[in-house]
Image (cartoon, grey):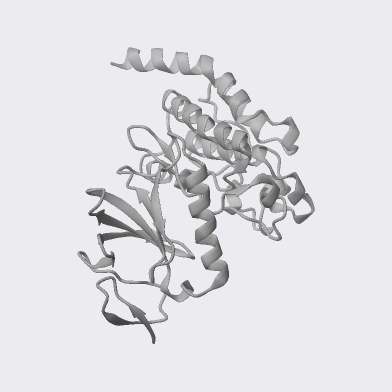
Amino acid sequence: MVGVVAADGGAVEQTRDRSWRFRPGEAIVAGRTALKLLGGGDRYEAYIAWDERLHLEVVAKVLRPNLVNEPNARAAIVAEAEALERLSHPVLVRSFGADLEADRPHLVLEFLDGPRLSTLIRKFGPLAAEQLVPLARRLCSALQFMAGEGWVHLDVKPRNVVMTSSPRLIDLSVARQVDVARRISRPVGTDAYMAPEQCDPARFTEIGSPADVWGLAATLFEALAGRQAFPSDGRGRFPQLRASAPAMPDKAPPALAAAIRACLVDEPAERPTAGELDELLEPLGDWSVRAIRRLR
């Protein structure tokens, strides 16, 4: 056990557990109350919380209790707070600040009430092209913005796309400025959606905005086909270092298939930028609107 101060100022004991186990109605800090556990990862737990100042439900992304005094974990939450502050864009999850010096260090994010793209694919199967194109163009907008700001997301994947009425790209926990990303010492991201230059230590200095375009293409392929572009082949991590881009589903409009394929090439410089991908998809966007109108 280690002693900490509770949100109400009283002394409490904190276990070295990985979970805070906040009960509904329990204060995370004064004025911010846990409502429901959303989930978590290696470093964080995410709770739906009520923020009295905002008078609104938010997401409190709280550093796990066993990592509160761990310097690298502290540095990571500070870096994510910086990324959220720097990268304000309509398609990126919004931040409402952070409480980094509290006994329960956390970020305050907007609560997006909608399923993740990964959940929709798992439950209902592939998306139709007329659904996918508008989604792809919104994500291109966010990634082109990040590229212009000199940042890379490094973890574009279906699980990090929330399908609200206006789809959003979330989770900037591993986002970095490009010059920082090129100095990583180990692969950063999620295996199945990492560009070749993210997977191979000999190529880390090539990391830049094309890596996010590759991740977007892997995401779009999965949404269109209902399966990962580079599933495990039983020969170790990163089959994308050994395999060429997969064949596109027969149902894919040729222009859409060609655009996704162009983003999955090995050489970063040969991929379109997010802005160029948006331009490739623009005519299909017009087609998708017409197709949706015909369905009404």
* Relative to 284, residue 219 above or below: below
Q: Position of residue 72 (x, y in %)?
A: 57, 68
Relative to 57, 131 lies left or right:
right
Q: Position of residue 106 (x, y in %)?
A: 40, 61
Q: Quadrant of the C terminus?
A: top left
Q: Position of residue 243 (x, y in %)?
A: 71, 44
Q: Residue at x 50, y 17 (%)?
A: 284
* Relative to 11, residue 249 above or below: above
Compare residues 201 and 81 and report the one nearer the observer. 81
Compare residues 167 and 115 and report the one nearer the observer. 167
* Relative to 252, residue 122 above or below: below
Relative to 112, 272 lies left or right:
right
Q: Residue at x 44, y 63 (%)?
A: 100
Report if residue 231 is visible in the image: no
Q: Residue at x 38, y 41 (%)?
A: 120
Rendering quarter of residue 146: top right
Residue farthest toward the left in the current orientation of the protein? 25
Report if residue 183 is visible in the image: yes
Relative to 61, 30 lies left or right:
left
Tally of numbered discs: 0
Residue farthest toward the right in the current orientation of the protein? 202
